[in-house]
Image: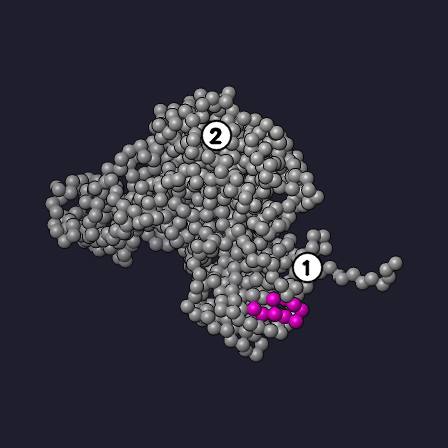
Amino acid sequence: MITNTELEIKGNLFPGKIISFSQNVDKINFTTENGVILQVTIIRGSVVRFRYATDSNFEKDFSYAISEKGVRGYSELEVKELEDKYEIITKKIIISIAKANISVSISDKEGNVICKDDWGFHWEQSYEYGGNIVKMSKSAPQGECYYGLGDKPMHLNLKGKRIENWATDQYAFGKDQDPLYKSVPFYIGMYEERAYGIFFDNSFKTFFDFCNERRNVTSFWAHGGEMNYYFFYGPNMQDVVTRYTDLTGKPELPPLWALGYHQCKWSYYPESKVKEITTKFRDLRIPCDAIYLDIDYMDGFRCFTWNKEYFPDPKRMVEELAEDGYKTIVIIDPGIKIDDQYSVYQEAMENDYFCKRADGPYMRGKVWPGECFFPDFTNPEVREWWAGLFKELIDEIGVKGVWNDMNEPAVMEVPGKTFPDDVRHNYDGNPCSHRKAHNIYGTQMARATYEGIKRFAYPKRPFVITRSAYSGAQRYTSSWTGDNVATWEHLWIANIQAQRMSMSGMSFTGSDIGGFAEHPTGELYARWIQLGVFHPFCRTHSSGDHGNQEPWTFGEEVIDVTRKYVELRYQLLPYLYTMFWEYAEEGIPMLKSLVLYDQLDPQTHYRTDEFVFGNQILVCPVQEPNAKGRRLYIPRGNWYNYWTREYVKGGMEQWVDADLDTIPLFVKEGAVVPKYPVQQYVGEKKIEQLKLEVYYKLGNKEVSKVYEDAQDGYDYAKGRFSLRSFAFTGKENEIIIQQHKNGTFITEYETMKIEFIGLPFVIGKIEIDNVVVSLRDLKYDAKNNTVVVPKNFAELHIVAK
């Protein structure tokens, strides 16, 4: 019999005072009297890692999110010991560590506090699971704003919100519903025009509270694992995003066709239906590059099989679709049907590749095929096996891409709609429960899929799309925002989610245009296609349960609107491809919320609707029914109305007319916008001329870029690309356009057709590389203000008459 047992009171525990300090190159360790260790690692002068251990030992250092290719190194590092604190000084920031309790305060070099602890690090012992519930709280000065965190369907500014990260299948989710499909534990804070970021790299269920519980405190915590976070200093918000994206990994360029328009439905079958849909697009002259096959293409929903009744000869069908310009994309889910006659199931069983419960049985759950087992994608052997399964689909049949669905992982008819917590995972040699592996399961499935497609599609580039994702998934895959609804509210949500995903490092994202669940009106579909063509991933998708959702479903007016905007997207492909090149090269987000575009303007901090597509096109979607226009905010600077060519001063709200066939668009003055001719699919036409729309600007130089390559393959990595930089300088009676070109790729076209917009004078003379050329030789069209020039000019000098 045990008597007088004293149980420790369950509650928060805190670090004691510092008793020792050590430094090993870029790592500085502080140890407290109660065994807490704070390890500060200087990644770059503006990127710092903070890692805490509570029992004098760190866990094995492993992360799926961190890229090995990220920039490392710094030019300045000094550690000072003062009376009551230590100071770590880099070229960009000063980190103060209090001796009394290892609380952290971070300032810029001018002494402005950027981010400081409130309670700082504390923890609670988990009596149910073992380990700790790790917590961090930061002071939140009045007026600080918060952004990021992935696909949350709520106001762009997260002030006052509490967020949960637990990848969840949320069919027909609503505004402010949380959690959803993705877990991106990265947020941006901004106060007094200075921005910083925090990435809490913890794959357990995590929470973020932005002044919800306590009005002057922001906090984040996890149900297990370490307190391990990275701090990024801007002060520009875009620099915070690019540094986070560099740390978690930048994507490679997709094939250009992946940036075209895609059509999908649950489900297009049999083959005759697929052909009917694809033929209709061509008949109506609505450009389209990809057609999707949902789960009904499979034999009894068994992955990597074909229903031979619906698709008797898939190789022939895929080849015929390719001849008409279509790339075939197929769905692959994680659930593998329990079937002794099914080769994929047999192989996984023979090699013990399925996830197991804690006491040994396989994780069994019901999904579309019925009872299923699930591969453990955290096991590198399983990922290698899974990649090999794509040989037939990609190499033999000719499928061009794969979308991974249901990979949260989603399981039907069970509490929580996912695996129980006791399911075990390999976690790349770091065995753990599903509590730790859940949020990264979908990303590791997408990674294995990417590796398989890349192996068998080579030398072409892979294309993968995923529903569930964790930070770093952008290295392998694009994404969409899941099972939305055909409502006006969801049009607003789609706009918010695409902006938020871009500022969370995952730009290659779009929504199901028109809504997945229920059925849109023609007006809603028209407004949604107008928005969707300005999202990096552009796809109409619907459940089919409530009717058809192809553009022609809604009548001639919507057909015309759809054609107009999809054609505009195809014209803007060189602009869009350049946006993606900047994203892949520098981590620059493809969509820029107004606050990301101009954080110094306080009017942008709570805007949700308007965004900048790339660097120079402002998009203002109409998000209400029966609208003949809308009020919107034009960012500071000067712009041109894309449709009317009217010159507009920014920094103010205004009303803009916008009937059903118009979405308000504005182009930044000084911009040089490249365009291709309309094509029904990428590669249909030889690009015989590049069009440049040049928007006049008086004053300072404006630089625009155009990136081009072979549109697929990896020659660009060997320097076979063309990067043109156009510097525009405008004066009252003349303009100068200077071109600088990098790369060895030679474009098919030899000339550029330049249209001058807003030019305040009549052209009298044009010099090309200091030689006067007759206007007749340049095919000068005075009515349309266009000229045709050789593609490789170094300088154009246009002078008034």
Question: Residue 522's mark?
Answer: none
N-terminal of the pair, mark 1 or mark 2, is 1
In reply to whether residue 744 is colored magenta, the answer given is no
Q: Residue at x 35, y 24 (%)?
A: 283
Residue for point 57% across, 29% down? 342
Residue lying at the far front of the rendered structure? 350
Crowding at dot 1, Cα within 10 Å, few <14 / some 14-19 / many 20+, comes out as some
Q: Residue at x 41, y 68 (%)?
A: 75
Work out which residue is located at the far bottom of the displayed protein and give it: 83
Report the residue at 51% width, 52% height from top. 65
Q: Is residue 438 left or right of residue 322?
A: right
Front position in the image: 33 or 726: 33
The percent position of residue 641, horizontal first and vertical second, equals: 33, 44
The residues tagged by marks 1 and 2 sit, at their Cα atoms, a distance apart of: 48 Å
The local secondary structure at tag 1 comes to strand
Q: Where's residue 724, x and y in %?
A: 27, 49
Q: Is residue 30 magenta?
A: yes
Which residues are the magenta region?
29-37
* Residue 695 image position (x, y, % from top left): 27, 48
SS type, badge 2: strand
476 to the left or right of 358: left
Where does label 2 land, which residue? 293
- Any part of residue 319 in sight: yes
Q: Nearer the viewer, residue 110 or 473?
A: 473
Q: Which residue is mark 1?
A: 124
> For the residue marked with disc 2, what is the amino acid?
Leu
Q: How is the image coloured?
A: one colour
The three-letter amino acid code for the residue at tag 1 is Glu
x and y percentages locating residue 152 in the rendered image: 54, 46
Q: Is residue 662 visible?
A: no
Q: Check the image and report above or below for 634 versus 367.
A: below
Question: Dots 1 and 2: beta carbons under 8 Å?
Answer: no
